[in-house]
Image (cartoon, rainbow, N blue to C red):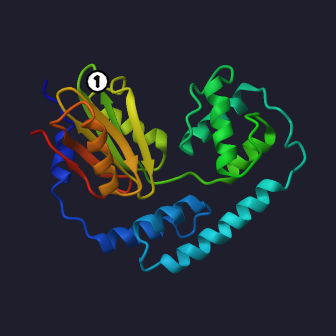
Amino acid sequence: MALVPAPDKITADATKPLDETRLELAFWESIKNDKNPELFQAYLNRYPNGVFADIATINLQQQKTAALESATVEKPNDRLELSDPASLHEVRERLYELNFDPGPFDGPMSTAAHQAVREFEQANKLASTGEVTQGLLRRLRDISGLKPWGAIVYSEASNKWGMAWSQDTRKAAVASARTSCGDPSQCPTEISFFGTECGVFTHSGSNWAILARANIQKAKDDALSGCRKRGKTCRIVASVCADGAERFSTTN
């Protein structure tokens, strides 16, 4: 069964040379004034010996210390449980944009939503309660959005796929990837990644794998390994980093 590729503009862009120095500078300019330590860690993951590595390390440590101090200082109403639909919706949207998966954004808080809260609390060295409180929402608001975002999506039923990069939000990246898939309602399987993380889609006649890792080579190796567990002729169909680097796709 032949794969149906994303639009031609993706395959055309994949052939353009990329200036790594220009990409590093552009990435640094996009995060240098940000207050999110995850972005400085993403920069160091890709450019451990980069021009701005020392500054990034200092900023990372300062922001981690400040975030930890802020998280441990309780403020009035922090323990107030949220119940209004607008606040519950905002909590789930903000969790989603921080790469936690809370399930549906509307309606009662689901098991997935409470689990996403616990994962956020654990990642930020908070007591793991799963409770949706004013304090949780405050901390979610204090953390800047992660960007840029990339995404790869796939439909096993139709064998269509799509990918996107350099988006301001996770939601925008997934929507763009699904549009490039041919129909926003298709391609339910998704992988999202931010900063300098990279995603790879591999496929064979009997198996496939889509995953994201901190760098492109690790993503390629792990995706091929995962695909080959049941398919011996796996190949890389598409790859891209969140910032647009390492774009590749094939229709062969």
Identify which residue is drawn at 56% across, 74% down: 57
Mark 1: give few (<14), some (14-19) or many (20+) Cα within 10 Å: some
Residue 153 against residue 108 in the figure, above or below: below
Q: Is residue 117 rendered to the left or right of residue 250?
A: right
Q: Is residue 48 rendered to the left or right of residue 109?
A: left
- Give the number of callouts: 1
Q: Is residue 177 rendered to the left or right of residue 58?
A: left
Identify which residue is drawn at 62% across, 63% down: 35
From this viewpoint, is residue 151 visible? no
Quadrant holding the C terminus: top left
Q: Quadrant of residue 119?
A: top right
For disc 1, the marked residue is 156
Residue 181 against residue 221 in the figure, above or below: above
Identify which residue is drawn at 57% across, 68% down: 33
**Residue 95, how many percent across, how many down?**
61, 40
Identify which residue is drawn at 37% across, 23% down: 185
Quadrant holding the N terminus: top left
